[in-house]
């Protein structure tokens, strides 16, 4: 999504900020909340930014594809892990002011064991588990903020979008991700589809997670590509509007690099370049991606 596109983007950013703060305060940590985790991985080896799902036959929560929380230490666990869970800033659909809750370190450990991971193969320490949870939670918060930027386009009709459900599609690469890989770029290490309740209307978002290198002080390392799925007219229209705004305000986005003076031919070539960029953006959004 865009970060600076003139007045239209400023309005969208203000609306996104209003949406993000249109919720009651809530405690940062809880002891034994319901089993929830707004980010997970499906049939892939877990990493620092993933919340692995059940590999056995336990009952699965269809809203988050997670089994019932297991807060008991594993028999051969080398050190105790905290069982407290952090409440996210992501409002939960179908509830009265509830928010999604992230897994505890103990739950994450047990989930990785269910996926076949064995701690003896890794030089893992208690601090590593704490960092994994922080990275996991930071990625989800970042994804929700990107969703809110898109939802700001509909702030007049819905000021309180909520996350309804989500699912992992790690190996089901989107067309955009596949074509990027054909062009020499790396594939995303994870993909999620989030269903957002826009005041009674379900809206699907596709989120591709790319490796962003070193973890920053705020435990963010993933580069997120968040966009509405191309499965409804409203979503297509949103993508068209954003593609247009990216082109129209490309000068501001690129720090006003357009030549202010000079010959007419130079200015004409620059406008042609901007128009070509707009055409490519439209092709990328409506033919390549979904």
Image: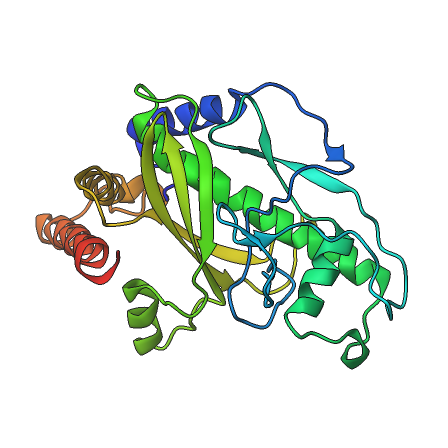
Viewer-side residue, 104 vs 66:
66
In the rendered structure, the answer to whether residue 246 lies left or right of residue 43 reads: left
Q: Residue at left 55%, top 46%?
A: 38
287, above or below 278, in the image: below
- The percent coordinates of residue 27 (x first, y second) are 72, 27
- The percent coordinates of residue 24 (x first, y second) are 60, 18
Q: Is residue 3 visible?
A: no
User: For residue 80, what is the image quadrant?
Assistant: bottom right
Give the quarter of the figure containing the N terminus: top left
Q: Residue at left 85%, top 55%?
A: 81
Q: Residue furthest right?
A: 79
User: For residue 201, what is the image quadrant?
Assistant: top left
User: For residue 195, what is the image quadrant?
Assistant: top left
40, above or below 55, in the image: above
In the rendered structure, the answer to whether residue 270 lies left or right of residue 57 reads: left
- The percent coordinates of residue 111 (x first, y second) are 67, 61
Q: Is residue 189 visible?
A: yes
Q: Residue at left 31%, top 47%?
A: 257
In the rendered structure, the answer to whether residue 221 lies left or right of residue 11 reads: right
């Amino acid at each position: 999504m865009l970060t600076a596109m003139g007045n239209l983007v400023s309005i969208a950013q203000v609306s996104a900020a209003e949406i993000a703060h249109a919720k009651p305060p809530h405690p940062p940590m809880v002891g034994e909340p319901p089993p929830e985790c707004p980010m997970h991985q499906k049939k892939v080896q877990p990493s620092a930014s993933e919340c692995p799902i059940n590999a056995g036959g336990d009952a699965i929560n269809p809203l988050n594809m997670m089994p019932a929380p297991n807060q008991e230490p594993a028999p051969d666990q080398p050190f105790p892990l905290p069982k407290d869970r952090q409440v996210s800033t992501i409002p939960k659909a179908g509830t009265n002011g509830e928010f999604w809750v992230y897994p505890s370190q103990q739950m994450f450990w047990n989930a990785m064991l269910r996926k076949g991971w064995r701690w003896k193969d890794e030089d893992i320490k208690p601090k590593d588990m704490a960092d994994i949870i922080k990275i996991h939670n930071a990625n989800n918060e970042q994804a929700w903020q990107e969703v809110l930027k898109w939802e700001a386009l509909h702030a007049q009709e819905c000021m309180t979008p909520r996350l309804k459900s989500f699912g992992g599609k790690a190996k089901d690469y989107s067309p955009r991700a596949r074509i990027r890989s054909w062009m020499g770029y790396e594939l995303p290490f994870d993909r999620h589809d989030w269903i957002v309740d826009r005041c009674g209307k379900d809206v699907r978002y596709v989120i591709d997670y790319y490796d962003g290198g070193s973890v920053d002080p705020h435990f963010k390392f993933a580069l997120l590509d968040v966009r509405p799925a191309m499965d409804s007219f409203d979503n297509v229209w949103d993508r068209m509007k954003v593609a247009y705004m990216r082109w129209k305000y490309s000068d501001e986005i690129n720090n006003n690099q357009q030549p202010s003076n000079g010959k007419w031919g130079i200015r004409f070539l620059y406008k042609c370049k901007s128009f070509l960029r707009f055409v490519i953006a439209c092709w990328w959004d409506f033919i390549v991606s979904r």
